[in-house]
Image (cartoon, coloured by chain):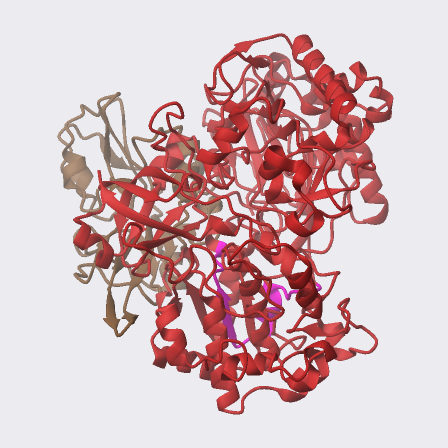
Chain colours: A brown, B red
Amino acid sequence: MPQYGFYFDSSRCTGCKTCELACKDYKDLGPGIALRVVYDYEGGEFKASGSAYSQNVFSYHVSKACNHCELPACSAGCPSGAISKDDNGLVYIDPETCIGARNCVSACPYSTPKFDEEAKKGVKCDGCRLRVEAGLKPICVEACPLRVLEFDTIDSLRAKYGDTASIAPLADPSKTKPNLVVKMAPAAKPAGDSTGFVANPTEVQ
Amino acid sequence: MESVVPNKLSRRTFCKTSGLALLATTGGVSLGTMFGCSPKSQGDSNAKEAVEAVVWSACNVNCGGNCAYRWRVKDGAIAYMEADNTGDTALQARACLRGRSMRRWINHPDRLKYPMKRVGKRGEGKFEQISWDEAIQTIADKLKYTIETYGNQAIHKIYATGMYSATGNPSARLLNCLGGYLAYHYDYSTNMLSAAMPYFYGDDFSPYDNVYASSFSEAAAHSDLIVMFGNSPAETRMGGANATWDFARVREAVVGRGGKIINIDFRLNESASGSTDEWLPIRPGTDAALVAALAHEWITNNQVDLDFLHKYCVGYDEQTLPASAKGSNKSYHDYVMGSGYDKQAKTAKWASEITQIPESRIKKLASEIAAAKAPFICQGWGPQRHTNGEDTARAICVLPCLIGKIGLPGTNTGQREAEPPTYLTGSLPAGDNGVKVTIPVYQWLNAVDHGKQMTATNAGIKGGDKLDSDIKFIWCYAGNCLTNQHGDINQTHDILADESKCEFILVWDTVMTDSAKYADILLPDAMRSEQMNLTNQGYSEYYTGVLLGTPAQEPPFECRSSYDVMADIADKLGVKEKFTEGRSHDDWVQYLYEEGAKDAVDLPAFDKMKEQGVYKKTLEPACGLKDFRDDPAANPLKTPSGKIEIYSEQLAKLAEQWQLAEGEAINPLPLFTPGFYGYGSTTKKYPLYACGYHHKARTHSSFGFLDLLQQAARHEIWVNPIDADPRGIKSGDACSVKSPHGEIHVAARVTSRVIPGTIAIPQGAWHNADMAGDKVDKGGCVNTLTAYRPTPLAKGNGPAHSMIVEVAKV
């Protein structure tokens, strides 16, 4: 069984959120739920030196959907067995089986599954698995104006780009073994970084 | 490359059931045959992917990108958008977050649905539905009355940029059929720069070509240092074939070979995201002071290129000053070294106080630029959009002159990255305007208020000495400059609300903008994706192309094509034949395409193009002013001297001839002057500077009403912790921002991504105030805070970025 995953190049990402809005358009989502989000992660400060200022400010973005983990915490914690992997290794929720227990929402270290208050079901990025089955890319990938996202078998992505998956503010990859490869921007920090903060919490909740 | 074949059965069903028979005959269905690419088969016919049709269209708002839309259409309605995934990956005109939200605009419940007439006071936004016939008759009657009573000069087609499409805006064509209208010169994007740069680089100067600027591809090929002043393509030119993508490749090429990028801006903009060491924070509106200090460093260290300055430029030192300026210490050298003008040496220490950049950093920057073999120095259009913008725009261009780095591989002219020179197909011809006098674009409100007092020397009127009439009829098609995107909304409201001044306002839009509330007649337009549409590549990228779109769905309710409505107005006034030349809207699209295809031999036949949707072609890199550099005698600039005029004798004459208000100046040299509401103008009541910027959630004000975008990219002011902490402001707090001109309420983001002492306010948010009550703008529109005080030379919108304010929690 192939295992697909995402590649994300943080050195090019400008935080434009086209990936997020392309997903919302395709999945017909309103303002309440986003299946792909973009973090603004920043740190540093200005220090007065006379009438001028020196600074060590940094900022970068992380676009995050589902990482379709090797050890999906969402699936492990689902009491109804509604979350499984498809033939391409993409983790998805079966809405027929989902009882809306919300365990996935709290279990995922990446805060990927959301709770749809209207349907009373969990929802998450399924890697556009029907598109993938049809030979297409997930809608976000070809949307990116900066060609930041790629989607392929994780083996191919790692052969091409290495195996870095640790980037703040995302969780430490040792927890769930995400099928994610990241290119670190010069300003990017590894997971667990304590020098910065998420500057747009209300945009990614 | 991925291609998609629509399910054949579904396609037939669509054509049968949708009622859009047009699609069946226009080839609105893409078969994925672009660039000889064979379609892939699809497995799952039940999947959402098995849509009935793929229909091309183009984005038409004013970021200049003109990105490609590939609509997936189901049951006669747009279902969702697919990216432009055709052809060379590097040329794919992938729409940005706003383009990907266009379906929400098209299908929004707030679309204007019927023609309406005003029933309340002007600006109240109270309307009543009327018939198309009544609307058209009223407009025709008002045009006739205005022309007979006041003359064609009393009709003004106001600056409006919400429609970039070859046949999208026939307004000028119709008005010219009636004898013409009062037109404008310059535009709101490059207002101060467009007015000032011809005095520096000559009369042929344009900010929109590849003659006076180099392309980003030139930088990618040859530069070792990129210096950007207020230029953030990641926020202004966001599409997948726009400058944001070009710039990503510039960075990778330049940094990849050991070069560097320096991004000078008052905020850590998104173009520096991830590479934030590139950011050099500066107080807004002080770029010319930094330039003078760099000049001082280079002069002191013998790093200026005197041969270049003497051969190619006027006014660097005494030797090349015009006779009228000789002998009185009027050169740029005198200004910089303190032997002329304010007698202040422009040392790094002097500039540090003004710019907030440490003295050592200014000196380091001077060394870095001087050491570069091929520095690419450029400016966005933010620095010029200040009250001192006319001098700032020129000052930045002095930098490459001082070191002789113009017209050589990998260098630039100090202007923004070049735009494509080639437009393969034309637009609906506007015809000849019988009114020869024009006003500076930002002066329309003064011309409503007191047009007859405006002259060439007191108001920048061109094509005549003065105006013969105030503006009595405003024609506003697809624009929001009546209020939202103009200066000082509160003052503007008062002038527009007075019906004895402007007697009739026509607004044409798709949703109820703030400007639309001021309409006397308000018309509901059809979206471009609801009509056939033709577009070239935009101006914010560097390739050439054509997009041909077909209707993806029918216009809702009584929305109509503007061309058809204008043809009906023309009919009422007896000029229908002149207006249409016997062509329908779609006939014009085909005619314009086929005329273009005569010269551009690669363009496919019209029917083939309707299937293909988009045609693209790369362009060779361009090096600005290369011809002039190679042979200045054979290729002189269109300045009086034929050279680059650092000192402009023409401006010296204007400074004597023009009537300027107290405190205003036109400077022959690009000096640093603080400008109105610039450096040093803060007060106890308004102790902070504020500066606008372009925000990813909107193209100017376009898309500004979509909740989806408002949530994904929030409208927030940026406040540095150094300013927020003493005011008790935390991220997410609702704040009041007050200027001498108005008050907005807006959420704060406390962030060190903005320089201390200045508040960053994203422009384009929709004004939302009780104009009969407290006028506090809950929408957070920046122009509630700006002044309406046109700049000295351009008479332009410099106050857009020059503000003083106070911020408090509410």
How many tags in the picture? 0
Q: Could you say which is closer to the camera, residue B200 or residue B623?
A: B200
A177 drawn magenta? no
Q: Could you say which is closer to the camera, residue B578 or residue B603?
A: B578
Looking at the image, residue A15 lies above or below residue B214: above
Q: Could you say which is closer to the camera, residue B250 or residue A58?
A: A58
Residue A116 point in image, percent of width and height:
25, 27
Q: Could you say which is closer to the camera, residue B591 or residue A191?
A: B591
Residue at x-position 66% and y-position 42%: B454
Q: Is residue B331 left or right of residue A175?
A: right
Q: Is residue B533 left or right of residue B40?
A: right
Span shown in magenta: B211-233
Q: Where's the C terminus of chain B, which quadrant?
A: top left
Looking at the image, residue B271 lies above or below residue B347: above
Q: Quadrant of residue B765?
A: top left
Residue at x-position 59% and y-position 14%: B115
Q: Is residue B114 visible?
A: no
Q: Is residue A26 visible?
A: yes
Residue B156 point in image, percent of width and height:
68, 33
Looking at the image, residue A47 lies above or below residue B151: below
Residue A152 point in image, percent of width and height:
41, 51
B228 drawn magenta? yes
Residue B447 point in image, percent of width and height:
63, 37
